[in-house]
Image: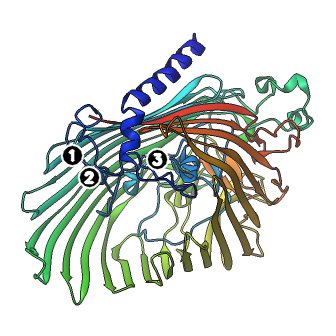
Amino acid sequence: MKQKILIFFLLSVFHFGYSQVSPKQELQKRPSQNNNQNNILNDSLSSSFGRDRSNNVVKNEDAKITDYLIISHKRDSVHLDTTLTIKKEYKFNYLRKDNFELLQFANVGQTYNSLAYQFANNKLMPLFGARARHFNFMEVEDINYYRVPTPLTDLYYKTAFTQGQQLDALLTVNTSPQLNFSIAYKGMRSIGKYQHQLTSTGNFRFTTSYNTKNNRYIANAHFVAQDLMNEENGGLKDSNLIYFENGDPEFKDRGVLEVNFEDAESILKGKRFRLDHLYYIVQQKDSLSNNNLSLGHIISFEDKFFQFDQVSENSYFGESFKPRDISKRVTLENLYNELNLRYTNKTLGNFQFNVNHNDFNYGYDNVLVLNGNKITNRLKGNVFGVGASYAKTINKFELQGELGVNISGDFDGNYLTAKAAYAISNDIKLSAKINSSSKAANYNFLLYQHDYKNYNWQNNFNNTKTQDLEFQLQSNKFVNLTLNFTSISDHMFFAKSEFDGMVKPFQNTNTINYLKLKVEKDIRYKNLGLYNTVMYQNVQDDAQTLNVPQFVTRNTLYYSNHFFKNALFLQTGVTFNYFTKYYMNAYDPVLAEFYTQTEKKYGAFPRMDFFINAKIRQTRIYLKAEHLNSAWTGYNYYSAPNHPYRDFAVRFGVVWNFFM
């Protein structure tokens, strides 16, 4: 039955893809082709469309693809892109982001291990914790707003493992040029191949944008509700690792392998409402005007919790206060208000000043006394801060700066970012950026409670201080290069205690120096291409609290061409992934955090994927054979200690845009 549904779905995609526009009509709209143009000519709507009344793709005859705008929380905008490129292939995953610096766990919807880090920071408040669950938790910067001449639908679908599917559907419409609504839901359910590994997640988003006809008042608002549930199994038992690594045929069915426990699950839930609006006190009326002055306000309320449940006590986590029904929920409520004043002058540049306030309430329902020590149940308080930013463009030279500081309240914090960029030509751009920050440790380092005795603490750590210097070279003709030098003081991390072997929070009071060099280059010859991404990292840390692989590489050899009178664009190739061995972080499900280990190195296993992608009108079709070399390069692949990486699998998916 499932095979019939899949075949029907594929036929429907091809049918509707071809029926949206005839090959003759499509050919008439496209410019002459150059075989070296592998950005696919072709957003298929790159020119005006809908002018031919026989084409029912868009009813608005004057609409262009550049009119379909996607607007970030910073009010930067890009137009909709329906092309098929290698970068789109890299983003066709559960996160819908390029995950080059991440390593997936075996099942979709589980966490990711980090192969690299970014320490530049502009946060003034501690983060919630349970960071391993936040990869798919949509933050403010992940929410987009829209402006469209006709209703637009974006559909993403991809198969999962054993049983389950992924779907991300968005509908946005402008009821008038001044008012836009969008509603979206990203849902996923996957059983996985190992015992007790079910994942079920949902991300609901609703956005609205409004501006008056004279653009004097502008408002963006969103509501997000998210729930991310994972069954937890603690990974394979140590006694079963040999069966996995030997490739014993009797254990190719991964459900046969024993896991550490089969009665636990964790869930992260959250809701957020945010309104960002401004009013122009002085508005630029024409090109001769020199000044803009606006008063803005941001209000955001977020409520989230993380909970770990287990039916029976398990020695994997040590002793507990009770033998059954182990459960603990930690919550955070945060109300944020900001008042800002923005001034723009053509000669002087763009200035912004703001004052902000955080009202936070983090913790548990009860006070705990453990070994004579009292562990409080709540961290509550108010933090007041100020900030400023500046931007100016002088011909080909750009300057940007931003700073923020907490001036009163329970948490100290500050950051300063300065950036300069120069466009040597239309293709070459150089930039340098410096970021300095001081931020309190995340909430779960400061306070944690649980039914397992080991997971109870209250600490007073120093702020983590970072200084990050970044250089960038951006050039499609030559190379894209990013170089980061980072110095970290008072680094926070989780690790197993030398006294009892249980996971606890620690702080490295020494200075860590971290260098990261990332290089990208797409080499093309006629219809062939070779896209290379290579990263080198070096860490000077005597305590080995920050561990990363020295080299990470991803290389894609691909072929691209048009067929059937340019109605079909096809892209096929092989992607090679590899990273050197290193002390890979281990995963703790009670905390939903990774912790440092220095007992065994993991990595140095190649991963090869074969893909065939196709584009018909606004429909992109993806078919991939993942980790196809798993059976003949050795079963030594892990995403974390005791957590094997994915076996060979064939997966299918589509991204489909409708213009109504």
Up-down relation of residue 122 to residue 267 (above or below): below
| Mark 1 vs mark 3: in front | 1
> Are the residues flagged by discs 1 and 3 in contact, CB closer than 8 Å?
no
Quadrant occupied by the C terminus: top left
Calculate the distance from the C-alpha at mark 2 to the C-alpha at mark 1: 7 Å
Residue tagged 2: 67
Calculate the distance from the C-alpha at mark 1 to the C-alpha at mark 3: 30 Å
The label number, if any, that marks residue 137 in the structure image = 3
Q: Position of residue 21 (x, y in %)?
A: 36, 33
> Are the residues flagged by discs 2 and 1 in contact, CB closer than 8 Å?
yes
Name the image quarter holding residue 410: bottom left
Q: Can residue 229 be seen in this view?
A: yes
Q: Earlier in the sequence, mark 1 or mark 3?
A: 3
Q: What amino acid is at disc 2?
A: Asp
Q: What amino acid is at disc 1?
A: Pro
State the SS at label 2.
helix
State the SS at label 3.
loop
**Residue toward you, 518 or 492:** 518
Q: How crowded is mark 3: few (under 14 residues within 10 Å), some or many (20 or more)?
A: many
